[in-house]
Image: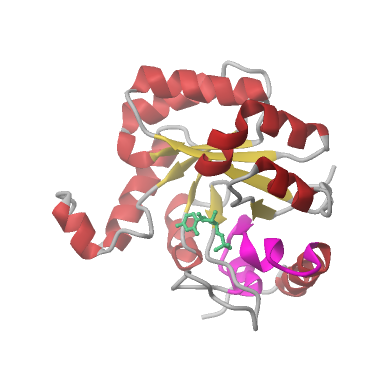
Amino acid sequence: MADPRILIALDYSEPKEAEALVARLDPTRCRLKVGKELFTRGGPALVERLQSRGYEIFLDLKFHDIPNTVAGACYAAAELGVWMVNVHALGGRRMMEAARDGVDRVSRPPLLIGVTILTSMGPEDLAEVGLDPAPGLLVERLATLASRSGLDGVVCSPRETEMLRGVLGGGFKLVTPGIRPAGSTAGDQVRITTPADAVRMGSDFLVIGRPITAAPDPLAALAAIEQEMAQTANTQPQP
Ligand code: C5P
């Protein structure tokens, strides 16, 4: 069975727009990420329609609440049949363990992924909410806690993948946004990495939005990214 590593971010406010794009894609070559805005508009029915077209869905709702509530939300996502779901690692060990119990109530649970520190938070933002360590240390600490709490992986910057791979080993999934093919525009992303470099640095799944969704021919854009990834898939990490 196809196991595509590209997760296309459906950052649309209208389900119709998302579905028009999806009609031009191919479920053997990508998975789809549905986030808070689109889910709040389209709900579980939209996820079901995308799944019925053959797509596997990363439900990016970043649950963060008391353990019992997060367990219930994760169970609901698992029952919806999504392929991946995520929670905030800052919810702590008991919340993440409850999330694990929630997804494990179905026979084929989704991958359960943690969000460490939002990349929109700089050192000053962290200090303001009482989190003092350097962001890198916090990410390592929260990813380690996520792993110990039974999560399958974390969302992280491609630039953190080598460090996390070293600390957490090979089986822990690393999901990386901030990807821009060589020559494409950065948009509002600041620290960007090419698909080739993300693969080299150890990313398992690449979250890619506008380079594909805003391309005149999304399938051609996807093909170019696949080709770039394939050329580097078996090379060693660069220093
Ligand atoms: O269009 P673009 O490729 O920048 O989309 C990236 C996607 O990844 C968006 O859905 C964005 O919200 C998400 N994301 C991110 N940076 C993070 C976490 C998620 O860009 N740190």
> Which residue appears at 70% of the width and 64% of the height?
212
Q: How many marks?
A: 0
Residue extent of the magenta highlight: 194-218
Looking at the rendered image, the quarter that the N terminus falls into is top right
Name the spot of residue 238 as percent of width and height, x first. Answer: 56, 79
Reply above or below: 204 against 40.
below
Camera-side residue: 109 or 55?
55
Camera-side residue: 68 or 101?
68
Reply above or below: 175 against 100.
below
Confirm whether residue 101 shows in the render.
Answer: no
> Which residue appears at 66% of the width and 68% of the height?
211
Confirm whether residue 151 shows in the render.
Answer: yes
Reply above or below: 229 against 78.
below
Colouring method of the image: secondary structure
Reply above or below: 149 against 209.
above
Extreme bottom residue here? 183
Name the spot of residue 15 as percent of width and height, x first. Answer: 67, 41
In the rendered image, residue 205 lying in the magenta stretch gets the answer yes
In the displayed structure, does residue 178 sit left or right of residue 22? left
> Which residue appears at 56% of the width and 20% of the height?
76
In the displayed structure, does residue 222 sit left or right of residue 96? right
Camera-side residue: 202 or 210?
210
Name the spot of residue 231 as percent of width and height, x first. Answer: 77, 74
The image quarter containing residue 49 is top right
> Which residue appears at 64% of the width and 50% of the height?
10
Camera-side residue: 203 or 80?
80
Name the spot of residue 168 as percent of width and height, x first. Answer: 46, 50
In the rendered image, residue 222 lying in the magenta stretch gets the answer no
